[in-house]
Image (cartoon, helix red, strand yellow):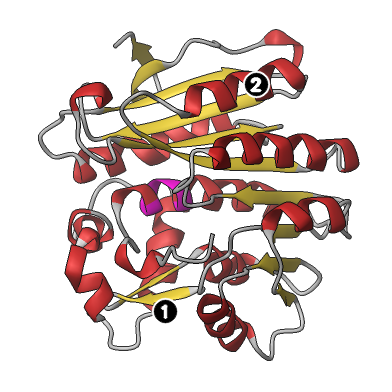
Amino acid sequence: MLSYQHDYHAGNFADVHKHLVLWQVLEALRGREKPFVAVDLHAGAGGYDLTSARARKTDEATSGIARLWSADPVWPSAGRTFLQTLRGMQPKPPRLTEYPGSPLLIQARLRERDRLIACELHPEAYDRLQTRLAGDSRCHVHKRDAREAARALFPPEPRRGLVLLDPSYERQSEYREVAEMVTTIRRRWNTGIILVWYPILAGRPDHPMREQLRAELDDPWLVSELRIAADPERHLGLAGSGMLVLRPPWQLEEQLPELLAPVWALLDPEGAGGLYQAAVLENGAGDPTLRRVENNQGTRTP
């Protein structure tokens, strides 16, 4: 699918949720000295100008990253480093005029022996991404389809690391394709952390995909959802953002509510939606029921 342009949606609430979950996983990988690899199968252009005509047409960053920009909540360390990194990327600081995509965020957390493998098929986005990452020997950009890359690039070296799948889901078939890619990757790479982003929409088309993966794979898993609508079925458009993490790092189930609770409060100031989480971890620990998370001390049912 070569029509999708993320410039129209960069920095929206779903980007913030997705990237903070990714950031927390990167922090876990950085917690050990061993090198890691991050594979971004739907990398996009790398960075997005929030003052461009495309971004201004939808202005989605205003109700996304812009709400965090001048706020001063009690941030966990991962939240502070996330915002510090974004501020350091601005061409006209302290103004918020650019939002980085996942490849640039990953690049910011790479150490000397870590690697990024970024895949993008759209010609314009590929050229922009290649330009942004040029000169960094740790970063490798591939012009290839994510489905082909899921077969060809795994297992990567080093074997420790993560892979991110976050297509546009403009085609209904992409949900099935993502499930197939995840299964293919897991057969070839049984130690990697797999992160899958999905939109929360009326009809919940993500449910069959997630249920298929849970049925076919025996990985520990964690689901995080940030919703801006009380009832997705009654909401037009994007009602929330979801992240499925297969083989989540140790303590992620405790860290995410602490990190995301103040973020959700800023992104959904009227409190219409909620922050939800579910997890089945090693040895059957955790709660498989998706529940509303109030804070890191407790939860309540919707």
Q: Is residue 51 visible?
A: no
Residue tagged by mark 2? 212
For the N terminus, the quadrant is: bottom right
Q: For the residue labelled by badge 2, is the local secondary structure a helix, a strand or a loop?
A: helix
The answer to which image quadrant residue 242 occupies is top left
* Residue closest to the eye, 30 or 102: 102
* Residue closest to the eye, 288 or 92: 288
The answer to which image quadrant residue 288 occupies is top right
Q: Amino acid at mark 2?
A: Gln
Cα distance between the residues tagged 2 and 1: 39 Å
**Image location of residue 55, percent across then percent down:** 26, 71
Residue tagged by mark 1? 89
**Image location of residue 158, percent across then percent down:** 88, 58
**Image location of residue 137, percent across then percent down:** 76, 83
Q: Which residues are magenta?
A: 15-19
Magenta segment: does it hold 120? no
